[in-house]
Amino acid sequence: MNQDAMKKAAAEAALVYVQPGMIVGIGTGSTANHFIDLLAGIKHKVEATVASSIASANRLEAHGFRVLDLNEAGQLSLYVDGADESNEHLHLVKGGGGALTREKIVAGASDKFVCIADDSKLVNTLGKFPLPLEVIPMAQALVAREMVKLGGNPVLRTGFTTDNGNIILDVHGLEITNPVEMENRLNQIPGVVTNGLFAIRPADVLILAGANGVRTLV
Ligand SMILES: O=C[C@H](O)[C@H](O)[C@H](O)COP(=O)(O)O
């Protein structure tokens, strides 16, 4: 099974969390795209969706789903999304696709966060995948200096603007031994809109697909 087939298998296993009449929060990225396409097969169960990016909203609408504004939808029962890394505590690094801010908002408004991934994403210590920060453009240099002080190497994601009109700094080489402490610390830096650590609000369920099948961590 190749990596994309594993992503699809993880997405398929998440369908059981969709109950009739739900408004489902939907993530962003290639694994979330598989989930959207598979969800279309049980569209009758889904009352509506809330998307974490313009790209996912477009894909959902192309399948004929109703896509609501989060303020209109209120608290959601379920959010399904991929990740770039997870540890065994279901602390995540996200934002490889640049959608981290809206993802963190929708995850924060959801009772259950089901993360779907191929099993290469499970790591002992987070941080091998460069940590994305969404940054207000005028704070780029300030935030970059703060990252160097923390031992990181910030790299501007060139030619990329987030759905919120901001830039992304990908921070290489950060040692993330305490993800909750690091997430809190990065949240204090002026100009950082969101950091890609999802540790204060981790996933509730992690579905991992590998060569030997699918397993679930809770
Ligand atoms: O901003 C993007 C998201 O956090 C994605 O969920 C993450 O990058 C994983 O993407 P993929 O499913 O394409 O591996």
Image (spheres, grey):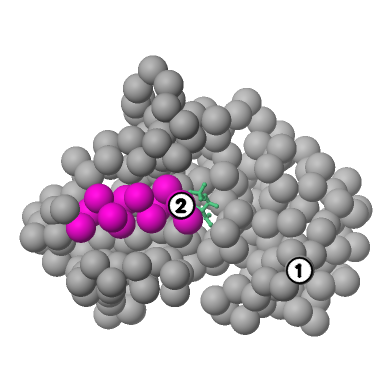
- Other residues around mark 2 within 10 Å, as few (<14) / some (14–19) / many (≥20): some
Residue 28: percent from left, percent from top? 45, 59
Q: Is mark 2 within 8 Å of ligand 1?
A: yes
Residue picked out by circle 1? 158
Up-down: is 214 above or below 99? above
User: Is 200 on the left or on the right of 160, as rendered?
Assistant: left
- The residue located at (86%, 70%) in the rendering is 142
Q: Tell me if residue 115 is in the magenta stretch.
A: no
Could you tell me which residue is drawn at 16 percent across and 53 percent down?
Answer: 41
Q: Quadrant of residue 107?
A: bottom left
Dot 2 amino acid type = Ser
Where residue 114 sits in the image (x, y, percent)? 35, 44
Residue situated in front as seen by the camera: 112 or 122: 122
Q: Quadrant of residue 115?
A: top left
Kind of residue indicated by mark 1:
Thr
Extreme top residue here?
A: 212
Quarter of the rendering containing residue 136: bottom right
Residue 83 lies, with reference to residue 121, above or below; the image says below
